[in-house]
Amino acid sequence: MGRVALTSSNQSSNQMWQLFIEKGVMPRKGLRPEVARSWQRSRGIDPWQIKQDILSDSSLQAKRQKCCNLIEVAHPIMKDVCSLGGQNFVLLCDTEGYVLDTVSNVEYPHPVGQRLNEETLGTNAIGLALVEGNAVELKGYEHYSSRYHSFSCAASPIRDEDGSILGVIDISNPFGDLPANVMKILGLGVKLIENQLRYRAEKMELQKMRCSFSSIIDVFPDCMLLVDSCSGKIINANDKFLQMLGQRNKEQLIGYCLGDLINYTEAGMDSLLSPEVEIPDGRLDFSWNNLLIPCSLLNKRTINLGRSKKQIVLAFSQDQELEPGRRTLYPLKVEKNYGFDRLVGNNDQWTYIKQLARRAAPTASSILIQGESGTGKELLAQAIHQASGRKGAFIAINCGAIPRELLQSELFGYEDGAFTGARKGGSKGKLEMAHGGTVFLDEIGEMPADMQVSLLRFLQDRIMTRIGGTQAHKIEVRIIAATNRDLKEAMLHDSFRKDLYYRLSVINIELPPLRERKEDIPLLAHYLLGEICRQHQRPSIGIEDKVLKALAKYDWPGNARELNNVLEHAVVFSEGNCISLDDLPGNTFPAGDLAWNKAGKLEEYEKAAIITALHQCEGNISHTAKNLGVARNTLYRKLKKFGIDIDLHI
């Protein structure tokens, strides 16, 4: 394809660029200040000749390993940004401008490892975003190098919690304009990346704190707990406390709400978790596995972590002088929803799936869970693990989110010095970490062919060797895989190995989409609403019958995950004690098909899903309708509604 036709604006930019390149004259007006500053900095660079600065394989591997968290978090969001439509590619660069990762639906000129800063290429979106520290958009002749005069680019820095730049994400169209709202979309993508990175950092910090805290509190003779003051969730417990409950695995206790373990009133819990109240009423009873254990509260201390984050250390003494029969089986007041209780629904097919999964849970057989995105594949996998009685951890890996170069080390680990940038002392892989437990391989259909061979070899004998190592390890782990792809069709196209499919699908469970069990929508909506209210620390609210009827009419292409998002939106914006139609992310619900008339996220998601499916099926309407789970007539109606031209998406 050639360059885009010059508009009057492009012609003006062209004249300014030529005047500056040939005579060094900076235009007085018509050129944005940040672009003018960048042109001045770019003087001395040949605008007609691209300077190649590409990392060696070992240096690139070291940089990618150093930024593995950023790459892992950013990659799926880059895929979403790239799927907006049009001829785009998305780049992730480090603070020096080196390309770390790419996603593209068009041929692009930059290999992974190339440097795209100002010093190398002159004015470009990535280099300008790094220098200015702001999101930027460049078009045509604003680029210093003539090679990019047909490009439209937008780039934004990614920052850590302290505001330091971690990298840059860029979206470019080599042949014309970017989508109209690209800067808003890019800003949202960056915010998602930053939030996920912050969550991971906090999780790692919490893990370090738990380890340090464990080494201290295990010395004390009393039962001790570390609790989050806001959520009331247990963060850590010492061995003495675990012995009191008769609980061996601490991980099964972490994350439990303290209020679900003790017979306390709501006011009593508020006092117990309040940093301002020293020691409330000292008597309380712990309930665990239907056993009532009377205790006395001995001490309470508050740990101030800054930014309004506080944790409470509680010390208990188990009462020794108990009247006969006091420590007996005792019905718990509330049981927190775990395991199969979270798989809400009474639909016949759904009930059969839960029965099948319960029967499969105690076995060691591999399980393949198939179903559309948002149908609850990971929830089912977690329920199977918890019902299995396995003592090891449940570890989930998204095979589509981890770059193929890192997936091998992520699964199997590596030894010290296995490659440049490898962590000193080596690192365990996820299979090793889950010894005695379960590994959940999500999006197994996206696993690269070479990794499929490695996984198949492991499934045959459960023996693995770390990268760069020679010692084989026997690993006792249960594999549960999941996919929203048709693996049988993938096998026909040789993109998924038949022998691996049969190894994984010893037990095959296919989850129905939400539109095929609409009778469960009211029940599921009430359950999700309760969970959302607890997460947002809001009092429970109801749902109007009109809302339930409207929800039941909608096809839910995003399944239960989309329903959860809609209800969370409603909870955030609801001002009463009951969700009404006005609280949903749409304005009107006419009779017949549910219409989300507000041009909000739901329509955007639905349109994006249709466009993505059209791309995957190369414009074949029958295949696209089948993949989306809708009738051909429905698909044609949606295409007309969203103004989607099939020819543009083949």
Image (cartoon, rainbow, N blue to C red):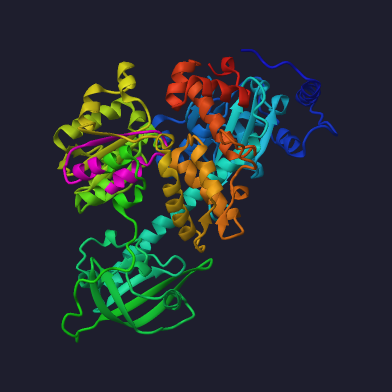
Q: Nearer the viewer, residue 202 or 290?
A: 290
Residue 585 location (% of width, % of height): 60, 44
Q: Which residues are magenta?
A: 355-383
Which of 590/22 is in front?
590
Q: Nearer the viewer, residue 604 or 418?
A: 604
Residue at the (57%, 33%) spot, across then down: 592
Q: Is residue 376 magenta?
A: yes
The answer to which image quadrant residue 606 occupies is top right
Give x and y (percent) for residue 177.
67, 25
Quadrant of the rendered structure where residue 498 is? top left
Please state the total of marks drawn on the protein image: 0
Q: Is residue 457 magenta?
A: no
Snapshot quadrant of residue 34: top right
Taking 440 as reference, is 248 above or below it?
below
Q: What is the residue that sits farthest to the top in this orientation?
A: 1
Q: Position of residue 293 (x, y in %)?
A: 24, 76
Q: Can residue 440 be seen in the rendering of this structure?
A: yes
Answer left or right for 470 relative to 441: left
Q: Position of residue 156 (x, y in %)?
A: 61, 40
What residue appears at the point 44 percent right and 44 percent down from the top-left corner?
521
Q: Quadrant of the N terminus?
A: top right
- Horizontal relation, residue 376 to residue 169: left or right: left
Q: Furthest-right residue in view?
A: 28
| Residue 165 visible in this rendered orientation of the protein | no
